[in-house]
């Protein structure tokens, strides 16, 4: 979400543009305004929520400033745990809402970036995916692996394992947002380097002039990308920048 990305941009001295919500919109940091957006239609969001509620499936709704959730579970539980380690300006704003359907329906000014669907049972999760794929004009992220995270509660390590997908507006991803910037800046895609590690990075890594896959990632495992660098604990991003940009 914008606030989280803005704080990271400030930390690294990036002062031009930030792309948020899986390519849902682009924010111009110098002009302090959105220059591109592809928000999920409210009618689609309500349709997805209805399916999830009827089938007791866990979901989140990502707005411009918060993650809407009914309970702290799966990814929301992970975010909440991570928040405890971060300064306020870098925290993910989690808004616990009892009736999300009603909240979305009645809030006329809400802009929705994406939705996340989670479940620990692969059979149940697959059956929901089939229903969601019947909804037109949305994109459903194809994630082949189970998400595995670990959080610490006191001296106890708690494992979070679940299947998940992300839903955005049709033809919306990080690469479509980068394409818009390419046109705005008058550059060629061959001049773009994209570094990624997960399923929602696939399009930009495949289409950029130089696609970089982080080590230990699903992209590397599936041989997606032109080059492969170290993982996050080995400063893989710095490796790519130092080797291919500074030179």
Image (cartoon, rainbow, N blue to C red):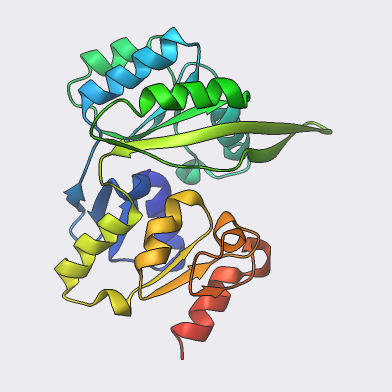
Residue 95 seen? no
Foreground residue, 233 or 213? 213
Foreground residue, 154 or 88? 154
Q: Residue at x 56, y 65 (%)?
A: 223
Residue 235 position in % (x across, y down): 62, 69
247 lies above or below 44: below
Q: Residue at x 36, y 70 (%)?
A: 208
Question: Quick one: which residue is furthest to the bottom in this view?
Answer: 247
Foreground residue, 111 or 210? 210
Q: Residue at x 44, y 57 (%)?
A: 202
Residue 142 seen? yes
204 relative position to 94: left or right: left
Question: Quick one: which residue is furthest to the right in this view?
Answer: 155
State which quadrant residue 42 falls in: top left
104 relative position to 221: left or right: left
State which quadrant residue 205 falls in: bottom left
Q: Residue at x 23, y 34 (%)?
A: 137
Residue 186 position in % (x across, y down): 16, 75
Number of numbered callouts drawn? 0
Residue 192 position in % (x across, y down): 34, 74
157 relative position to 14: left or right: right
What quarter of the picture does the N terminus occupy?
A: top left
Residue 48 position in % (x across, y down): 34, 21
58 relative position to 39: left or right: right
């Amino acid at each position: 979400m914008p606030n989280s990305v803005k704080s990271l941009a400030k930390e690294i001295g990036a002062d031009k543009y930030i792309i948020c919500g899986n390519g849902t919109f682009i924010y111009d940091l110098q002009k302090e305004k959105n220059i591109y957006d592809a928000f999920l239609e409210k009618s689609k969001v309500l349709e997805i929520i209805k399916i999830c509620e009827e089938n007791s499936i866990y979901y989140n709704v990502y707005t411009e400033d918060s993650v809407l959730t009914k309970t702290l579970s799966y990814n929301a539980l992970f975010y909440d745990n991570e928040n405890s380690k971060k300064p306020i300006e870098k925290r993910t704003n989690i808004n616990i809402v009892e009736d999300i359907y009603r909240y979305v329906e009645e809030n006329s000014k809400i802009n929705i970036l994406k939705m996340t669907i989670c479940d620990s049972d692969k059979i149940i999760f697959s059956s929901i995916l089939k229903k969601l794929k019947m909804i037109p004009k949305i994109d459903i992220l194809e994630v082949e692996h189970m998400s595995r995270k670990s959080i610490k509660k006191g001296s106890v390590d708690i494992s979070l394992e679940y299947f998940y997908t992300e839903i955005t507006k049709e033809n919306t991803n990080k690469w479509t947002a980068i394409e818009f910037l390419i046109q705005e800046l008058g550059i060629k895609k061959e001049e773009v380097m994209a570094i990624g590690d997960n399923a929602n990075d696939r399009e930009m890594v495949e289409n950029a002039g130089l696609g970089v896959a982080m080590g230990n990632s699903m992209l590397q495992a599936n041989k997606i990308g032109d080059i492969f660098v170290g993982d996050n604990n080995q400063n893989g991003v710095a490796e790519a920048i130092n080797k291919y940009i500074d030179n």
